[in-house]
Each structure stands twice: as C-alpha cells, then as structure tokens.
Image (cartoon, rainbow, N blue to C red):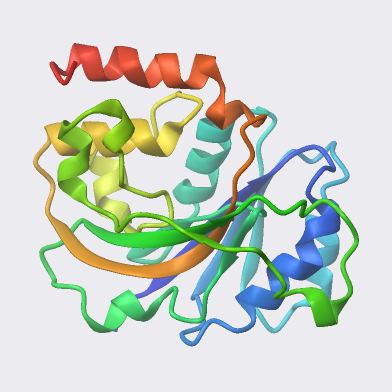
Amino acid sequence: MNSTSLITVAWGNKYKIVIPRWWHYIERIRIKPDEIIIAHHPDDDTGVRELVEQHKDYNIKLVECYERNYAKMANTAIGAVTSEWFIPIGFDDFLYPNALDFQKVVRPDVDIVLASRDVTRDNIFVETRPENFTKFHRMLQPTANWASLSKGFEDHRVFHNSPIRKSLWERLGGYPDYIIADWAFFLIALQNNVKVQHWCAVTILQYCNSKTLSQSEEAYNEIHELRKSMGLE
C-alpha cells in the first residue's frame, strides 16, 4: 500500500483554539497517516507542542521554520516527509474519514490525485465543546477538474487537499513563493504535463473567509500574472 503524510504549518496563536476540533477529525480517518509533519515558528505559542505531547500514539513530527510565510513553511514540512505521498492541510481544514482512501485506487504512474471539498463560513475561532465538533454549515463545491486550470481564472477547480507524490514536489522544485502557493504549484505542474488521476472524492471541510490573505487582491494578482506568463490569459 502507498504511504502518506499529512503536512501543515503553524505560526502565531490564532489557530490554537481550533486544534482540538481539528484533531477530532484526524482521529476518525479510516487509513491512519504514516506521519503528521508540522512546520512551526518556534517563538510562537501555536499549541503544536502540546498536541505532540497529548497524542504520542501518532507519529507527529515538528520541524522549525523562522519564516512566517506559507510556501516556505510548507516546503520545510514537505522536505521532512518520508512517505511516498503527502496531503497539505491547514488547521482550518477538517478531514473526512475517507481522506486517505485514494491509496486503494491510485495508479502507479500518477503524480497528483484530485480530491474535492466542502467549505464552511462558520466562525471556527471560538471554543467549542466536543459534542459540537461536527456541527457545521457545509457548502459543497464543484467537483475537482484538472482541465479547469487552463480555462478562465474563475473556473479554478483544483483543490489544495489533493494528494501529491513527493517525487513530483522534488522534480518541480517545491512550492513557489506565492501567497496561494498550491494554486501556483498546480499551474506549474500543468505546464510540466504531470500525470493526474481524477478521484474527486470530497475529503475535507475547509474554512473559507474572504478576509484571509489567500483571498486578497494581492494573492489573486500573483496568480493572474503567473497565468499570463503561461499564456492562459
């Protein structure tokens, strides 16, 4: 069977209150990840050290990164991956039990396995009792579609929770230094004609907020410029 790591990043203390709810979902994944790698800023009270102490039955590894920058932190975490595959997630992503089921169906020549997502706009930054961990207003998003990358900007349907083979990350030089690093990575992957499998199962509930940096005008302008350089606009 294929091996898979979950990778995430942590800086500041904003997501500390969310970690117990996030972990509730991790524990319910049907296929246990081989490792969970968290890149964190060691000067910040992120709550990840406590997470490691509380869950020693999981292979959780902390790696330090002094850059409060998603792409650099994600690359630090992925660099420590020892599994064949990794899935990038945030502490505002709540994984469904089927998140690693792709391992049962993935073809050996594939570099990326497309997964779909639900989203929520509920306020996750409040203390929540365990009996309410699964209470969300959920909005199903369009099914993942690799061809959407070469269509219009608004047609984008390739989501960050799609499993990626580590050897592809190495081949492409890691995540580029963009605010929406995963979108930029997928565009570069498109240029390189990587092999993609449309699994498209909904594997995650993602918190979305229009005020986050990843949904800012600056972030979208970066992607627009990259698409222009590739002849997609």
**Residue shown at 61%/33% (left/top)?**
210
Image x and y of residue 186, in percent: 28, 39
Q: Determine the image quadrant of residue 55.
A: bottom right
Q: Nearer the viewer, residue 23 or 79?
A: 23
- Total count of labels: 0
Q: Is residue 194 left or right of residue 180?
A: left
Quadrant (top left, top right, bottom left, bottom right) of the C terminus:
top left
Is residue 174 in view? no
Image x and y of residue 96, in percent: 52, 75
* Picture layout, residue 213 above or below residue 64: above
**Residue shown at 31%/47% (left/top)?**
158
Q: Is residue 226 left or right of residue 65?
A: left
**Residue shown at 16%/37% (left/top)?**
190
**Residue shown at 13%/31% (left/top)?**
191
Image x and y of residue 189, in percent: 21, 38
* Picture layout, residue 31 above or below residue 93: below
Is residue 96 in view? yes
Quadrant (top left, top right, bottom left, bottom right) of the N terminus:
bottom left
Q: Is residue 176 left or right of residue 144?
A: right
Q: Determine the image quadrant of residue 117.
A: bottom left
Image x and y of residue 23, in percent: 71, 71
Name, please, the residue furthest toward the bottom: 30
